[in-house]
Amino acid sequence: MTRRSRGLAGVTAGIAAVGSLLLGGVSASAATPSSTGQRDFAVAQQSSASSQGNKAAQQEDADHAGSGLSARVPAPAVKPFSTGTLKGLDVSGYQENVDWPSVATNGATFAYIKATESTDYVSSYFGQQFDGSAAVGLIRGAYHFAHPDASSGATQADYFVDHGGGWTADGKTLPGALDIEYNPSGSTCYGLSPASMVSWIASFVDEYRARTTRYPTIYSTVDWWASCTGNSTTFGAHDPLWVATYSGASTPLPTGWNTYTVWQNDDSGTFPGDQDLFNGTLDALKSFALGDYSPPPPPPGTGWPIVRQGQKGRQVTTLQYLLDANGASLTVDGKFGPGTRRAAASFQSAHGLTAHGIVGANTWQWLIVTVRQGSTGLAVKALQAELNARGASLTVNGQFDADTGAAVLSFQADQGLEADGIVGRNTWRALVS
């Protein structure tokens, strides 16, 4: 989950971001080593690291949850809504020795630290990062960077638990996390079919749970989850979600979940590494460390709706008009089918957005067209259809005439917007919400 250097991010520009699985549970019998044990463990880690080739070690230090996400998406158009959330970070060997007193002073409450990768790497900085974060009062946990093409999920879960990924009910240790994401050096989904990937994840989850008693949290992105698991709903019922998106909103979420526990919202910021937010209070974070936790629904976002395949109605009609206004050739029927999804994904790709075909805040803001008296075309039809859905009686003819202008002024006044008759970002957002 830790940010790569800009150079490494450029090298991996084709890699999408990810999926870290925050493993939601572990038993006290599988406890993380004590501070003394961690120091002994760090010596062993350093010895292990020294036996690896420098190039391989540098790559594995850089691999982290969300490795490719910053290379695939632009800077957020809207800054994350963070009221009522707790700030945290995730780091790996790339950050080396972290200044934890400074991190705590700047307001961090929790951290995830990379422990292992596949079955041949242990971070030589894990001890400093894991013990150092606890020493300044952070609630912290470990994570594992998965290579599903290298060995079974159960084998990697055992390696993780045996090399720092355990858990203890001490109130300051989070359940371990599985970072499963776009392959940093090969086939996007590691050469696995969606069914095989789901089986691999289940193998890791089941073994980790057997070793620790708790279900793991799954950290992922919408696009990776769709591409590599086929939008599996297998894990949403019991595995907490750590979602990665830099769009400025925590939604959309991967299929199977209706909320999240942790949100990785940026690859840089106040703290070293990636920036994270916990969905809950400090007491809730402590509950998550000690056992199961049911997070609340996602906090209010940017006001832009999430529209995806399978939906019907007004918002889909508006979306189809706006996609057509931007070069698509859809039949405007208010039904979000495969054709609308393909058109949305194509539009997203053309504008440097994550091309998952789910329309959220960033996509809406690229789609909208400012219209006013005298404007014509499909964007005006979208406007007229929206106004009619809200009580107007306009002919949907694509002509921004006097009647359309009057309806716009009335809508803006009702919504507390500046009543200038110009349909820009704020008016569009109020219309489609």
Image (tube, rainbow, N blue to C red):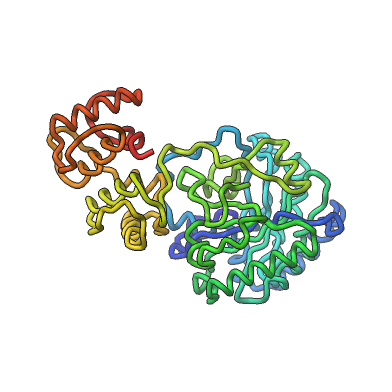
Residue at horizontal 59%, vertical 62%? Answer: 63
Location of residue 47 in the rendering, given as x and y in whole percent from the top left corner: 77, 68
Q: Relative to 365, does residue 142 appear above or below in the rendering?
A: below
Question: Residue 20, located in which quarter of the rendered image?
Answer: bottom right
Residue at horizontal 34%, vertical 56%? Answer: 344
Please tell me which residue lies in front, 144 or 369.
Answer: 369
Location of residue 73 in the rendering, given as x and y in whole percent from the top left corner: 43, 53
Instruction: Count the numbered circles shown.
Output: 0
Image quadrant in which the N terminus is located:
bottom right
Residue at horizontal 78%, vertical 59%? Answer: 42
Question: Residue 84, located in which quarter of the rendered image?
Answer: top right
Please tell me which residue lies in front, 154 or 60.
Answer: 154
Residue at horizontal 43%, vertical 44%? Answer: 76
Q: Is residue 277 left or right of residue 31?
A: left
In this orientation, does residue 54 appear?
no
Location of residue 263 in the rendering, given as x and y in whole percent from the top left corner: 57, 47
In this orientation, does residue 136 appear?
yes
Image quadrant in which the C terminus is located:
top left
Q: Relative to 177, does residue 198 appear above or below in the rendering?
A: below
Q: Is residue 135 left or right of residue 228?
A: right
Location of residue 317 in the rendering, given as x and y in whole percent from the top left corner: 30, 48
Please tell me which residue lies in front, 52 or 29.
Answer: 29
